[in-house]
Amino acid sequence: MTDPQAIRTRIADLYLSGRQDHRMMGAPSDHAAITLLVARFDDAVNRRDLTEFSALWCDDAVWEIEAPMPMRTEGAAAIVRTWQHMLGGTQWLFRGSFAGVLQVDGDRASGRWPCVETGTFADGKGYDNRAIYEDQYRRDAVGWRFLRRRYVYLWLSSEPLPGAPVALAAGA
């Protein structure tokens, strides 16, 4: 078996056999595309890439952050403005997502992603948390995009962080 698609399908079949309780439905390519969407979100935040961040959202998307810092924003343009404002209040920020679970149903999907964010606010306070993103996605002519993201804090600290950010080389 040397066909890459056949190999991916076989791996997915092996992974899914006996694991139907996880409701991992949908083609492996859908799962890969949504996983890439989440990775692109993390990358856009880490690089503060406005163009990339803007491309990830459906026009009618909703972005929510739960307590202790609640926020709800509707519409892609408003989400981007809110994100710019939020990043403006930080000296630096790093975020990453861990392996998530997905359920795909045609051109709609949902997923949950454990994640971490660490940074320093402009006033010097630390920001370190563990959370879950609960997502809804929609596939359109562009591909899979966020229809709704809901950030649920699990743990949060505002203690000053040890160390200092390191400047990255251009293009990193």
Image: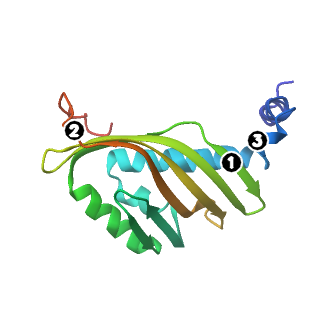
Disc 3 to disc 2: CB gap under 8 Å: no
Please give the label number shown on residue 46. none
Q: Position of residue 70 (x, y in %)?
A: 38, 63
Residue on which the image places disc 3: 22
Please give the label number shown on residue 102. 1
Identify the residue shown where x is 73% and y is 63%.
107
Image position of 15 (left or right of 82):
right
Which label lies toward us, 1 or 3?
3
Image position of 37 (left or right of 64):
right
Taking the view exactly as shown, the residue that stands out farthest to the top is: 1
Identify the residue shown where x is 28% and y is 59%.
86
Disc 3, SS: helix
* Sequence-earlier tag: 1 or 3: 3
> Between 83 and 7, which is closer to the camera in this rendering?
83
Disc 2, SS: loop
Q: Position of residue 30 (x, y in %)?
A: 71, 50
Against 145, is 99 above or below?
Answer: above
Q: Please state which amino acid type lies under the numbered disc 1.
A: Leu
Q: Please state which amino acid type lies under the numbered disc 3.
A: His
Disc 1, SS: strand
The quarter in which the N terminus is drawn is top right
> Between 69 and 139, which is closer to the camera in this rendering?
69
Residue on which the image places disc 2: 159
Q: Rounded to the nearest whole Å, what is the CA distance between mark 1 and mark 2?
A: 34 Å
